[in-house]
Amino acid sequence: MNKNDLIFNSKHIWHPYDSMENPLPCYPIISAKGIFLTLSNGKKLIDGMSSWWATIHGYNNPRLNNALKNQIKNVSHIMFGGIIHPAAISLCKKLISMTDKKLEHVFLADSGSVAIEIAMKIALQYWKKKDFEKKFFLTIKNGYHGDTFSAMSVSDPTNSMHQLYRNYLPTHFFADSPKSKFGKKWKKNDINSFENLIKKNFKKIAAVILEPIVQGAGGMKFYHPKYLKKVRSFCTDYKIPLILDEIATGFGRTGKLFAYEHANISPDILCLGKAMTGGTLTLSAVLTTKKISKKISNNHPGHLMHGPTFMANPLACAVATENLSILQENKWKKQVSNINKIFSKYLFAIKNHPMVYDVRILGAIAVIDCKKEINIKKIQYFFVQNGVWIRPFKKLIYIMPAYIIDERSLKKLISVMIESLNSRFFFI
Ligand SMILES: *Cc1c(COP(=O)(O)O)cnc(C)c1O
């Protein structure tokens, strides 16, 4: 890529949440291997982001590549209507065996946001009597569930895209987000807001939806498992399905294979995505219990109203199967716990830094919550100059590296993160 390519990019290509008139700079990456990204000038960067939770086993992973190559030889894509293929069978068997045993039915979709749409449709169709009497969802503030319309409608009502679209989106119920932090003391009153909403409105509520333990793009906050346990028991008491969005947390990131395991509970509907293919292709899954699928299939019109063109894409299924096989070999547990130890050793030490509001660590996730808004353009230039790839947002500098990262590279990521706190030019 030369200078003209970068000019073409800035003139013609949208990037996530960016302007077409005054876009943030883009860095040209021509290849990636393991935990390293290679810029077009040959410089290598240590990746701290796993491409937004996804590349848990590193880039250009030979096992994942082989799974793709072998599948290409057979069939890259085939419609799923009236057709089944071995890649979908293998993947669904694994998904069913790795998740809670009550989750027996799998819907394979294209992306995380679409998985949320499907989960919400499942809840609506589950209840469908006349005119969707139960058409509202109950969730918690600070959530993030994706960028499509229903997903936006259950994301945080003030700090998300919900705000921009508020006059367009349906209004659901938002409980206060949990204040009891993961690993800290449980405050009994924390559940009051949720409890009041479910008690008062259960007749109108189709499902409860939330991110278990980690609220990701809504602020990178880790909450007390007891909150989730309470939510589960209220859902059970009021016979309301619980949808858990494990799109970010699933597949080991929090130190458990699924974050709901921290609370020893299970959902009625589970959404998976991001790391499922090891960050090679887009694919998501929605798992449900037999009870829910049965009722949908018996309700009018007798089937679930969803069926995307690329449903169960064989390439994505094949590579996801291999990715899950790697996870099933169980190296991730030690990898994530080693990452966690190093995070704890070096990052808790900066808690009293004048620029730091809070440091949060869970599994292979580390967050420095700063006192001021970050100048993304300036700080990112500094990161790249120092050989690391970190993409902060708002007041948060956070990393969630691939599980395979070595100690030296991890320490380098951490030290550059810490160093960035010392320049007031990186803060607004
Ligand atoms: C990223 C994310 C989504 C949306 O997934 P996409 O693949 O980006 O559509 C939904 N929920 C959570 C918790 C996420 O982190």
Image: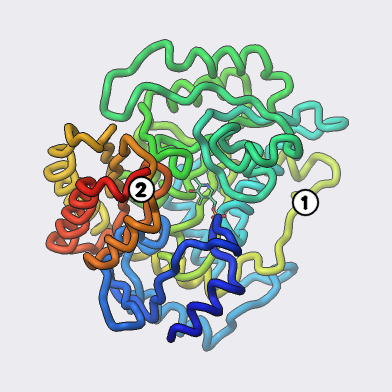
Residue at 27%, 59% (x, y): give it.
Answer: 403
Q: Amino acid at mark 1?
A: Met
Q: Is residue 86 left or right of residue 44?
A: right
Label 1 within 8 A of ligand 1 by Cβ: no
Q: Is residue 258 above or below residue 43?
A: above
The image position of residue 418, as x and y in percent, is 19, 48
Q: Residue furthest right?
A: 130
On the rendered image, what quadrant is the N terminus found in? bottom left
Q: Is residue 60 above or below residue 215?
A: below
Residue topped by disc 1 = 305
Viewer-side residue, 372 vs 274: 372
Viewer-side residue, 145 vs 15: 15
Q: Would residue 290 be seen by someone viewing this image from the given angle?
A: no
Label 2 packing within 10 angstroms: few (<14), some (14-19), many (20+): many
Label 1 packing within 10 angstroms: few (<14), some (14-19), many (20+): few
The image position of residue 316, as x and y in percent, is 52, 70
Which image quadrant for residue 200?
top right
Q: Is residue 95 above or below residue 101?
A: below
Residue at 65%, 65% (x, y): give it.
Answer: 311
Q: Would residue 108 be seen by someone viewing this image from the given angle?
A: yes
The image position of residue 218, as x and y in percent, is 48, 39
Residue topped by disc 2 = 257
Q: Is residue 265 above or below residue 145?
A: above
Q: Check disc 2 and report its element: helix, strand or loop.
A: loop
Which image quadrant for residue 204?
top right
Residue at 30%, 47% (x, y): give it.
Answer: 365
Residue at 15%, 49% (x, y): give it.
Answer: 342
The image position of residue 63, as x and y in percent, is 35, 76
Q: Check disc 1 and report its element: helix, strand or loop.
A: loop
